[in-house]
Amino acid sequence: MTYICIDQNIPPVMKLIDGKAVAEEIKSLTKIELYDFTKSNNRTPTLAAILVGDNPASKAYVNNKVRTCKEIGFNSLLVKLPADISEEDLLAEVEKLNNNDDVDGFIVQLPLPKHIDEIKVTLAIDHKKDVDGFHPINFGRMAQGLPCYLPATPYGITMLLERYNIETAGKHVVVVGRSNIVGTPISILLSRKTKLGDATVTLAHSRTKNLSDITLQADILIAAIGIPGFITEDMVKEDAVVIDVGINRVENPDNPETNKLVGDVDFENVKGKCSYITPVPGGVGPMTVMGLIMNTLKAAKKEIYPS
Ligand code: L34
């Protein structure tokens, strides 16, 4: 018998984390859950979204959310408001949704125009309908490991890690970026004493010194800074898992009339070095939408807040 000698020094095979495909799997499972829900409750879960102004990126994201609701069979309600709406009038729209019994959960798509205080608006949302998980009650409950709506992007990331059997316990996770909607919550979530946590987390940001010394220690590197191609090959440890949360619109060299979507990671050069990587588009983005959908189903079932 002859044996083929396998070169032990071949580079590791990078595996793509296919957020689009995982989102499709979850959609199928959600349809089954929805069937049971509508049969026993005689109603359909309803998600509402408030979209202020006409920021093209926000429009695209909200449209994805509305389209996904339709595909699954949820009701959706899109409230479009002009960019020059007053804060008072926007707060009145929030109040209407708080009081609308047909609406299980709703979101106010961010960013809002500069003249509106985002914190004030977030605080005005009934935390029981806050399927974005941005209200301090949900955020605080998340930090303490109590039942809550998890913010959609961190929720989506944990679903991807779970689906690809990527262990987090004892791993060093480095998060780059400390926003309220991604960097800060994902760093808390992954450090909690839970199945998808138990990691040692470093939260790095714009004031971090010697950033690459830190990112090079990451078993799992989460980039959420909003700067195209910021994470370069020399910042990534061999075999690391790379989660790219950035969605940046840059000019498309092939067609200057259109925009190209790129992440915070220099994908082409980093992909050969890591064990897993999420692409942009088709990585975290579709899972953010699924995080929101899962929260909406939880809201309809009154799973987090029974009364
Ligand atoms: N209130 N504001 C609120 N809730 C949120 O959860 C968000 N976010 C972020 C911006 N503001 C928000 C989103 O919805 C980012 N985000 C989001 C949602 C969906 C997608 C990306 C970001 C998405 O679907 N991305 C696709 C491509 C979309 C496109 O073609 O533009 C992807 O494949 O990455």
Image (tube, rainbow, N blue to C red):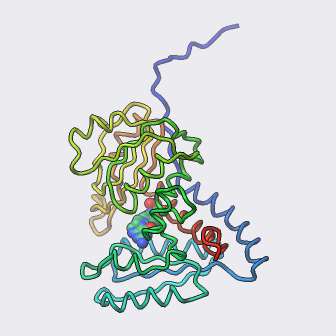
- Could you tell whether 236 is left or right of 287 in the image? left
Query: Which image quadrant: the N terminus?
Result: top right
Examine the rendered structure and indicate whether residue 22 appears above or below residue 131: above
Camera-nearest residue between 167 and 278: 167
Examine the rendered structure and indicate whether residue 40 appears above or below residue 163: below
Camera-nearest residue between 248 and 92: 92
Camera-nearest residue between 289 and 91: 91
- Give the quarter of the image for residue 72: bottom right
- Ligand 1 quadrant? bottom left
Q: Position of residue 205 (x, y in %)?
A: 27, 50
- Could you tell whether 41 is left or right of 82 in the image? right
- Give the quarter of the image for residue 87: bottom left
Query: How many discs mark residues in the rendered view?
Result: 0
**Which residue lies at the image location 67% right of the left edge and 65% below the top edge?**
30
**Which residue lies at the image location 33% right of the left edge and 73% below the top edge?**
111
Q: Position of residue 96 (x, y in %)?
A: 48, 90
Query: Which image quadrant: the C terminus?
Result: bottom right
- Could you tell whether 278 is left or right of 295 in the image? left
